[in-house]
Image (spheres, rainbow, N blue to C red):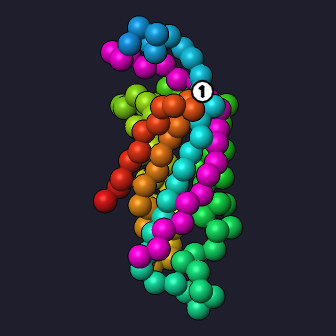
Amino acid sequence: MFELKILNHFSAAHQLTMVAKKCENLHGHNWRVEVCVKGERLNEAGVLIDFGVIKGYVKEIMKRLDHQFLNELPYFEKDPPSSEILAVYIANSLKEMIDEPGIRVSRVTTWESDDACATYFPE
């Protein structure tokens, strides 16, 4: 089994309810995002998938989130844009973009600060 990791980031604001009074206020983060994909077989070039392909997909997803008030985005109408739900959104978005057989999203971690993150394992 092979796993590749891509790092990226975005800045955005959100507002959470029923968490803690401090987090219920409108506030923002500079999120750091780790995206991992995995697969069992390397292609004829000896790689799982070209890093550039995955980086391009992740960059496209980050553009949707960067400098937004996340609560106003359609995806987050039902579920609050917590770090956990952001990880799910990124994983699902990437899953839709990957068209190489045998390659799947293994985990997405969203860091909202240097010492706090959430990881989603889609399997």
Residue 117 position within the rendered picture, expressed as x and y whole percent measured from the top left: 47, 36
Query: Residue sitting at 33 percent across and 15 percent down?
Result: 18
- Name the residue tied to disc 1: 29
Q: Which residue type does callout 1 highlight? A: His
Q: Nearer the viewer, residue 95 or 41?
A: 41
Q: Main secondary structure of the magenta part?
A: strand
Query: Residue sitting at 36 percent across and 53 percent down?
Result: 121
Q: Does 30 sit left or right of 22 as displayed?
A: right
Residue 96 position within the rendered picture, expressed as x and y whole percent measured from the top left: 47, 61
Query: Residue sitting at 48 percent across and 31 percent down?
Result: 116
Residue 87's place in the image compared with 115, above or below, is below
Indicate yes or no whether the magenta region holds residue 78: no
The quarter in which the N terminus is drawn is: bottom left
Residue 69 position within the rendered picture, expressed as x and y whole percent measured from the top left: 58, 25
The quarter in which the C terminus is drawn is: bottom left
- Magenta-tinted stretch: 1-19
